[in-house]
Image (tube, rainbow, N blue to C red):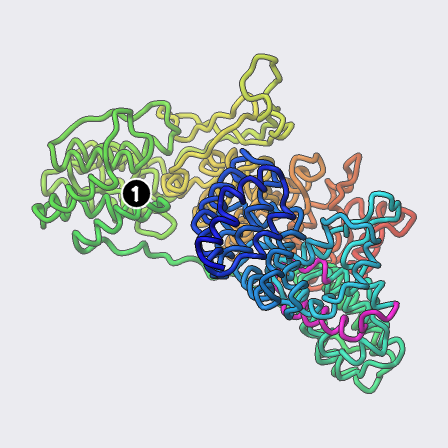
Amino acid sequence: MSRTATVKTFAWPDAMRLIDRHEIGRLVVRLSTLDAAGRALLAPDVVRYAECRAEELLVGARPHDAAVPAAVLAVGCLDDPREVVRLLLLDAFHLAFQVDDREPVVRAAAARGKGWLCTVGTMLAAADDTGAAWRLSAALIEAGGAPWPTGDRFVTGWMLHHLMDAVPELPLDRLRDDPRLDLFLPRMFEVAGVGDLLRLSLRQPSTCRDTPLSFVHALTLLAAEGRLERRELLDLCVARLRRGGRRLRAYHELLDALAPRPHEVAARAEAFGRLLADGVTGVAVVAQRALRASDGAGLIDPEFLLRIGPDVLRRPEQAVVVAQLDWIAERAAREPALLGRWREVLGAATRHRCGAVRERTRAVAEGLHVARPPRTPPRDVLPFPPAQEPPPPVSSVDELVEELTALATGPVTAFRLERVLEGLPRLHAQARVALIRAVCALRQRHFRPGDRPPVTAVDALAVVLTALVEGPRTVAVPRDAPAPQRIVLGRVLEMAQRLRPIVAAPTHAGGLLDPGALLDRLVHADRHNWGPGSYDVTQALLRLPHDTTNALARRAAALPTSAGARLAARLEAGAAPRPTFDRIVVPRRAWHPNAWGDGVRDRLPPARILVGVRADGDPDDLYTVPVPEAVWLREPHPDEALWPAVLPGQREVIAAHLLPSVAATADSWLRGPGTLLPLLAGCTGPAGPALPLALAYGLAARGGPDRTAATEALLLLAAAGTLDADRVGADLGELVATGLVRGNRAVEALDGIVAAGAPGVAWSVLRAALPPMFAAERASRSLGAFLCVATAAARNTTVAGTIAGLDDVTRRPGRTRLAVEARRLRETLGGN
């Protein structure tokens, strides 16, 4: 047929008329009569038509059936299979996905031979990144008889076909008769994301009223009837679980549904052992249950259990470890010749983080008559006291710039601020030009002064750096700031008015200042004719030890300066003012229908225990801590980390200042302030109620870092011999008994102290915490856990006697955890 005859016989207008009349069958027939020249004439119009239809389908301007003629024209006219695939995968919403009636497309491609069918189908399956073209590519491949692709998207599309496509057959029959099942079965355990599809229900006819089947259940049934090889399915499942990763729940359910028989588990003992030791919790439980059943049939070698035992006992899950201990107890009873080796295995659980696991380990060891270590309780492992020397001063302008940058961008620490305040005047005198140049660059990045009064030390430093460049300036200290913060701001802002050396730099790491060192500094200031700032002198006097001698008072009084007179008066007094502490229960803010934030109010605790402080002869209210009338939303002050160094000899006063923030970490949603407790532990001063109460709140804090810091502070105080454990325990018991904090968090913290090697510290706190819990009208849900930790602590300390209220709890009937743990504690105390 000539080129002219082809155009006259079937041209593009003819194709459009057939499409408009919905005569797709005739269109397929006419296309099949074209030769290469006729197809080449239609190709440009076919490309434009397909691109236009794809865009219209994407925006919803055409019905779905408009995709069929575009696909028919593409496979029937174009000679380049890559161009066909490109058109079928146009845009994000493919033409191929819209083709509901695939039979005309397959016939149009089949008219050009099976080779064309296989080529287009295979290339379409390979290029389809989303799986949307699976139905069309599968129809082309099946008609052409090509090998089925096993790519990730094609396998996923096949599974979606069974999950979503409406067919008359029952889902199990359809899957059983699918010839691709055996080919795709291994890929179902390899393709990423398939795990989610395995748990979905297969599509069933609308007339079917049977319970929907998921892929997991269908595979299990097909293996039971012999359609699938059970051994292969079990191997694939175990191998997939051993590889780990995410979305394993379907494979875990499949393994559970297959219910491996004892001989099957024994043949795969090593694989199941690794699932038990390293698998996620659900998989480990299934593997453990299967291995124990196989062991019950006598198919597990004891060497295998001895080999995997330590890894399993180190798992964090209490249920898995306790079940493993029970299994070891059963097997060890049958293997008395291996008692020494079973003891070595049990050693892996002796330092488990869960107290119940440690106690169960001890009970298993005793039941097997394994010799216990000598009953000489070891001494608590306590941390070394912190360094006594403060960090050295800055030595260069570059080091000063590093400290300033760290203050502006990182956490603010007292010694970092002290190094800056000491280095600024010294380096200004030694390298003024270099310092000014560095300050100018630094101001642009981090220290731009604002229009509002300074609130933080960094705000005040911005004023000082501006004064270094532009000249002295006077900025008032906000009077509404907390007393410690007024001292911090006042010392810094004094430098903006006059840059001079400081005299309040601490001589000890805890923030204390030696009286002799302060006197030498004041003598040096008088000799060189510069007077220290008023706030700096106030800070220096606050940093003196609480109890001082008046041996230096005469030398101080001889100084012709006001600073010398203030030091002499402080030394002659012999001690700082002794404040009075009031322990107050503050209720939650009363509800009001028009008040802002009542949703926030509902998240606040019903009450909070705080400590108010007042002192006689305190005109500047430095030793005064007011208590709010009601609990309300309160953000911590950004500079609270600086406050312990303001009054290092009065840690109870600073603890009262920080108590609202620390309490909010336990009874509210605040995180972070609990990390200041180790700073308080490094301070000194007379005992009071604020620090023990802060430690009790810190042990029950919501965040792990806050609880860890409270534990560290507790151990630091114990190492220094200044821990009031009875008061900490009484406060903790009251908070838990009244429901103001969650006891399970404190249990975790105290259990960590026992595991860290300080059971004596934990016991001293628990001994005082348990009686208030026993006396509560309604026992806390965590009381059983408290008793478990107390038993673990008591076993490793030299304790005797009993605890008030414990006998009443032990007499309670039943086998509840509370009663069981109470009896165990009573036996432990009676045995010491």
- Is residue 312 something that shows in the picture? no
- Is residue 400 something that shows in the picture? yes
- Picture coordinates of residue 27, whole percent (x, y): 60, 48
Q: In this view, does 494 lie above or below 11?
A: above
On the picture, is 669 further left or further right than 412?
right
**Front one among 116 and 237:** 116
Total labels drawn: 1
Q: In this view, does 233 lie above or below 759?
A: below
Tell me, yes or no, whether the highlighted magenta stretch contains residue 650: no
Q: Which residue is the site of mark 1?
A: 408
Q: Which residue is drawn at 84% across and 53% down?
A: 170
- Picture coordinates of residue 652, whole percent (x, y): 48, 38
Q: Residue at x 54, y 52 (%)?
A: 708
Q: In this view, does 9 lie above or below 66?
A: below
**Magenta region, main secondary structure:** helix
Q: Residue at x 29, y 25 (%)?
A: 453
Secondary structure category for the residue under label 1? helix
- Picture coordinates of residue 183, whole percent (x, y): 70, 70
**Front one among 229 and 434:** 229
State the extent of the magenta-drawn residues as a range. 225-251
On the picture, is 49 further left or further right than 192?
left
Q: Is residue 540 above or below residue 321?
A: above
- Picture coordinates of residue 135, whole percent (x, y): 65, 54
Q: Which residue is outermost to the bottom?
A: 337
Q: Residue at x 28, y 24 (%)?
A: 452
**Quarter-of-image position of residue 566:** top left
Mark 1 belongs to which amino acid? Ala
Tell me, yes or no, whether the highlighted magenta stretch contains residue 250: yes
**Quarter-of-image position of residue 488:** top left
Q: In which quarter of the image is the C terminus?
A: bottom right
On the picture, is 818 further left or further right than 727?
right
